[in-house]
Image (tube, rainbow, N blue to C red):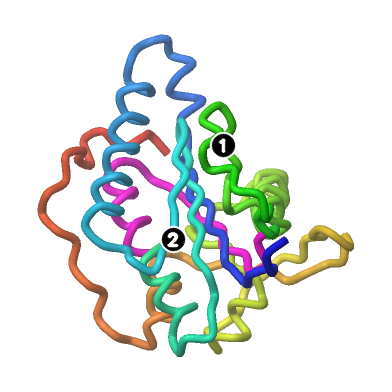
Amino acid sequence: MSDWRDCIVILIDLIGVKRLASKGNSRASDLMRCFHEAVRQEMRTGLTSLDHAYVWNDAVLLLAYADDRSGALQESLRDAARLKRRVDIVAQSYAIAVKGQVFPRPSRHIDHDTRVTVIRASSYAMANCFEIEAEVKRKKLRKAWYVDERIVNELHMNAEESITVELLPSSKGRKIYMYSGECFASSLTNGLQQEPLSPDVSCTKSKQLPS
């Protein structure tokens, strides 16, 4: 078996798709397909610090390896923030970022098993994204970003408002810091101007979900 690798896993989820789908028209499915294309465009043209994006329905899961290269963690979060900005043009979203270790890949080569896809982001960090999401929904929170304290401490990000969530594998409480989109960008870039999005956006604010 190969070694465990440090990683961050980021979940970006659209808001209100279930409510839109319940209306029985094609708006929800059209919007999700537009979202998928936006993710594909961004991954094709940049975001090189993100190893892989797994997109389905109204969510995307991002995997980035947190190696020893200087600035790797910050670069990955900047790329994830850029993708979220593009997603927010399609529809309002929230993001959850957790640091952990991906499960080792089997020593036996399995890439040719075409009927089984093993998600390389498989990890407790991935599972904890959904643990945090469940707590956010239970508390009916409305922030743009929810960030693992391990990431906040390593990057010396500004940290104020937080919740404590019991995370796997030990069920110990860990602080999850909450940010608006503007506060997250400012904390992450230390006041540096955000890189502008490219003008090629196939889905516009006119298709944004209702709040």
Considering the numbered disc 1 on the image, is that residue within a helix, a strand or a loop?
A: loop
Magenta region: which residues? 81-102
Name the residue tied to disc 2. Answer: 51
The first of marks 1 and 2 along the sequence is: 2
Image: 24 above or below 104:
above
> Residue placed farthest to the top in the image?
24
> In whole angstroms, how far apart are the C-alphas of marks 1 and 2?
16 Å
Look at the image and tell me in which quarter the C terminus lies: top left
Q: Is residue 66 left or right of residue 180?
A: right
Considering the numbered disc 2 on the image, is that residue within a helix, a strand or a loop?
A: loop
Image: 158 above or below 211:
below
In front of the other: 88 or 49:
49
Residue 82, numbered circle? none
> Residue placed farthest to the left in the image?
199
In front of the other: 68 or 195:
68
Please give the name of the residue rendered at 71% of the width and 65% of the height, measured from the top-left corner.
Answer: 163
Name the residue tied to disc 1. Answer: 117
Q: Look at discs 1 and 2 and give the one toward the viewer.
A: 1
Image x and y of residue 141, in percent:
61, 52
**Circle 1: residue type:** Thr
**Circle 2: residue type:** Asp
Q: Is residue 9 left or right of residue 185?
A: right
Please give the name of the residue rendered at 33% of the width and 38% of the height, measured from the top-left corner.
Answer: 35
Please give the name of the residue rendered at 19% of the width and 61% of the height, measured from the top-left corner.
Answer: 197
Is residue 72 on the magenta stretch?
no
Crowdedness of circle 1 by 10 Å Cα count: few (<14), some, many (20+)? Answer: few
Image x and y of residue 22, in percent:
49, 16
Image x and y of residue 51, in percent:
44, 60
Please give the name of the residue rendered at 38% of the width and 79% of the height, measured from the top-left corner.
Answer: 186
Is residue 87 on the magenta stretch?
yes
